[in-house]
Amino acid sequence: MRSFPGIAFALALLVLSSSSAQTATSQPAPPQTARQALIEMFFGQGPDHLEKHLSGDTLRTYQKLGGANGQGGLSAFSMFAKQAKSGKEKFETFDTGSTFLTAAGPVGASYDKMEITVERDEMVGDQDRIELALHLVSNGKDEAILPYTLRFTFSMKKEAEVWRLHEVGAAVRFPIADPAFLKIVEEQQLRQNEQAALSSVRAINAAQKSYQSAQAGFACTLSALGSAGKQSGVAKRIYIYDPQLAGGKKNGYTFALSGCDASHYQVVAEPESPDSGARAYCSNESGVVRSSSDGKASTCLVSGEVVEEKVPAANIQVSAPTQGNATPGTSQLEQPVRVPQGISAGLLINRVPPIYPPLARQARIQGTVVLKAIINQTGDVVSLDLVSGHPVLAPAAIEAVKQWKYRPYMLNGNAVVVETQVLVNFTLSEH
């Protein structure tokens, strides 16, 4: 009987331990934070992950609105997440710490990874304000690839124990006196001008081939390829539809033709500013484009390096239908015929308009995305390559153009595969 107190004490401990374990197991999950609610809103998988975090008035209003391409007004709130998922980028969200989201850069982008960091997360009155900043990472380093600082502020308010989005703010900072900022702007413009010059030299080569087929010789001036008017009482055919290029100056470059006869010509593209650091480009009837880093056309013609056709690939993989005895998984696309952009535009029968990226709209990014397109004999776009354009705008342009439909291009009575350029303009309305 002396051991009874010890036994009773042990039983009491066992009961208390069991009771404590049951209590811990039955404890409700901690309430959702405003940050977790924001992540669920944009990246959740539930059927109402978006709607549950909007106020009743907001939800009723946006449900009445219609958006582009038949999409509802609510799609604007989740467009970023939709694009990330449809583009198959790898992204990860974090509900604690200084990082909000990381995502791999899309194919063809000038950056490797995108990061969104939390700059502020604090209660202001009855609202939790979360400020996020966008960073683009290249070669493992956080670099200011965008020549500005872009930040978003989300104000969340708790209603009926649920965090709901009440306000979204965006701020863009342009440090126009900062030498680092100016260097980024200069580098970006330089690269864009070079890409445009390379594209223009290719366009001149394509125009010369068409001119030779029609005139039995090459043109000796750019104006002959691009000037309208009449020749011997007959309207002249235009081979270059870009008046700036036909005039010999475009995007900080001077273009010229020389050494032409029935079977030869040379074309050069030289930067107007000798000390700009831009490359010079040159080519001839072979179609091979060369470049020189000193920016001199004379150097390019004598010892220029062949430009590798490593234009950043677009995020599109389309295979043409196999024909005949082609091996499964391969295509028998014939050598494409180069067609000027103006001609291919006239064959377009179904144009799907691009969806303006919300990020670009917030940052007031505008411009033209230039794509190299291969169109098969039935008028379907089977390949796209990015030639130039802002990396934030390019994915939306690619997504739209791959759905375009053309009339077949006929050559000698037969439909042929063509290579052409497609221009997609992004312009913000002032209203």
Image: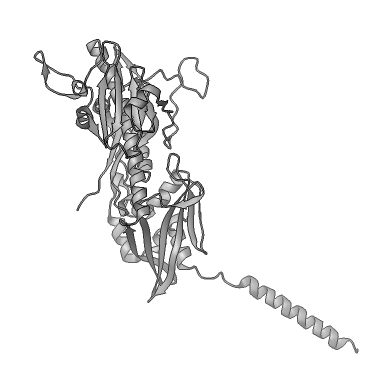
- What is the number of callouts on the image? 0
- Across and down, in percent, residue 223 comes to 18, 23
The answer to which of 92 and 146 lies nearer the viewer is 146
The answer to which of 397 and 178 lies nearer the viewer is 178
Q: Quadrant of residue 340?
A: top left
Q: Left or right: 39 with respect to 230?
A: right
- Across and down, in percent, residue 283 comes to 34, 22
- Across and down, in percent, residue 32 comes to 49, 68
Give the vertical position of 60 relative to 388 (above or below). Answer: below
Identify which residue is drawn at 33% across, 59% down.
Answer: 173
Q: Left or right: 104 with respect to 245?
A: right
The answer to which of 180 and 123 lies nearer the viewer is 180
Identify which residue is drawn at 33% across, 62% down.
Answer: 169
Q: How is the image coloured?
A: one colour
Residue 275 in sight from this viewpoint? yes
Q: Left or right: 275 with respect to 92?
A: left
Residue 407 in sight from this viewpoint? no
- Across and down, in percent, residue 141 comes to 49, 51
Q: Residue furthest right?
A: 1
Give the vertical position of 13 relative to 209 (above or below). Answer: below
Identify which residue is drawn at 52% across, 64% down.
Answer: 97
The answer to which of 327 and 172 lies nearer the viewer is 172
Q: Quadrant of residue 189?
A: top left
Q: Left or right: 44 with respect to 369?
A: right
Identify which residue is drawn at 36% across, 44% down.
Answer: 187
Q: Quadrant of the N terminus?
A: bottom right
